[in-house]
Image (cartoon, rainbow, N blue to C red):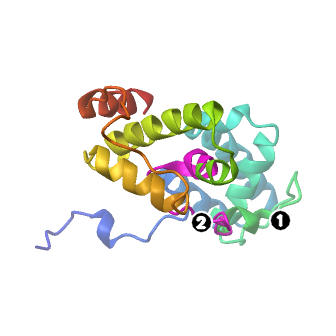
Amino acid sequence: MDIKGLDYNTKREKLMMPEYGREIQKMIDLAVSLPTKEERQKCANTIIQLMGTKVPQLADSSDYEQTLWDHLYLMSHKQLDIDWPFDVSEAEKILSKPQPMQLPKDELKLRHYGKLVSELFEKLKSMPEGEERDTLVFYTANQMKRDLATWGHGSIEDERVANDLARYTDGVIQLDLNTFKFEKVSVAEETKKTKKKK
């Protein structure tokens, strides 16, 4: 539908920095078209003051004014001929996208158990039998059950914990489910804890 006199955003030129709004962009376009350098300079100084009111969160940064002038330079499509109070030659770095983050090289076998439990699996493999290992098995198995309640889509069967513990310790740890006692774990409580952290 095309109604005469109505100007829709979808038909307008895309803003380079939408946080400043279309009116600031129009002022910058006007400044570029002014005939004398003196007029352009005066207009640019006024625009910078207005830009500062549009993004007050920038005021906390140490290079606040430099950032505003860099933005003005970019929004003018590098066409504004004035005496720049700051060096704007590096301004285009603002528009560059950050490099993707490198993922850890040691991939976790099961992400819902996390890195700490994976490290416990490795430790349990090399520990000698005894009370210390039994205590660590108890804490590891219960942590696994809590992790399953939180991240494992509600599946917290004792058999699954026992199987995973045996599998990821290369068969060194075998839980006897007839004698081993898990702490009581509620799926609802673990989910509630996770939501509170967020």
Q: Is residue 113 visible?
A: yes
Residue 191 point in image, percent of width and height = 31, 34
Tell me which segment is drawn in magenta.
Answer: 99-120
Left/right placement of residue 180 relative to residue 97 reads left
- Nearer the observer: mark 2 or 1; the answer is 2
Q: Is residue 34 visible?
A: no
Quadrant housing residue 180: top left
Label total for image: 2
| N-terminal label among 2 and 1 | 1
Amino acid at circle 1: Glu
Left/right placement of residue 59 relative to residue 121 reads right
Label 2 environment density (alpha carbons within 10 Å; few <14, some 14–19, many ≥20)? few
Query: Which residue occupies the foreground of this view, 83 or 15?
Result: 15
Residue 79 point in image, percent of width and height = 71, 72
Give the residue pinned by disc 1: 90
Residue 85 point in image, percent of width and height = 88, 51
Q: Is residue 89 above or below residue 188?
A: below
Quadrant housing residue 147: top left
Residue 113 falls within the magenta-colored stretch? yes
Residue 87 falls within the magenta-colored stretch? no
Give the residue pinned by disc 2: 107
Q: Secondary structure at mark 2?
A: loop
* Picture disc at residue 54: none
Residue at 26% in and 34% down: 187
Residue 149 point in image, percent of width and height = 32, 40
